[in-house]
Amino acid sequence: MEMTPGTLAVLAILAVMLVFAMRAAVRLWTGQGGCHGGGAAGRRRRTAPADPNKDHYAYSQTFKVSGMTCQNCANAVEDAVNRLEGHLGEASLQHGRLLVLAKAPIDPAAIERQVVDAGYYVVKTR
């Protein structure tokens, strides 16, 4: 069976596409790429709350967050809340929720701004 130049060109293009797809898959599987956490973002320093003791927080509110598709996304949402003084965030990737604990009454608009600035969306609050 003889290969025509057109067939060879198509095979070459498919081979190049396969190489790039495999490189992307390896980066994703090894945590070096993918959703909001590839490269340097995946190795960024987490923002810990100033006070990690949940018993010190008198107020709580749950927010439904859209756009979290991996653990790095959930970490980014938690970090956004943890940057607010007197707040502690716990994001659940499985349930698409963000639990906010605070030492003073919670301002839902401030939480929503933090979440949106991190690249996600507040769908509803509870």
Image: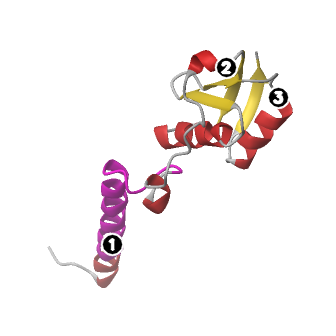
Front one among 51 and 16: 51
Residue drawn at the location 27% of the way across and 81% of the way down: 4
Looking at the image, tell me whether mark 3 or mark 2 is earlier in sequence order: 2
Distance from Cα at disc 3 to Cα at disc 1: 49 Å
Disc 1, SS: helix
Residue 8 figure quarter: bottom left
Q: Residue at x 55, y 29 (%)?
A: 52
Instruction: Give whichever of discs 1 and 2 has the lower sequence position.
Output: 1
4 lies left or right of 21: left
Question: At label 3, which amino acid type do we have?
Answer: Pro
Q: Mark yes or no: residue 67 visible.
A: no
Quarter assignment of residue 63: top right
Horizontal and vertical percent for residue 126?
Answer: 76, 15
- For residue 40, say whether it is visible: yes
Q: Is residue 20 above or below residue 44?
A: below
Classify 120 as above or below 97. below
From the viewer's perspective, is 41 left or right of 28?
Answer: right
Q: Which residue is mark 3?
A: 108
Q: Image height check: is 56 above or below 42?
A: above
Q: Which residues are magenta?
A: 10-36
Q: Which residue is mark 2?
A: 57
- Image depth: mark 1 or mark 2 in front: 2
Q: Residue at x 77, y 21 (%)?
A: 125
Provide residue 67's location: percent of width, then percent of height: 63, 38
What residue would you read off at disc 1?
Answer: 16
Determine the residue located farthest toward the bottom in the rendered image: 5
Q: Position of residue 77 (x, y in %)?
A: 62, 39
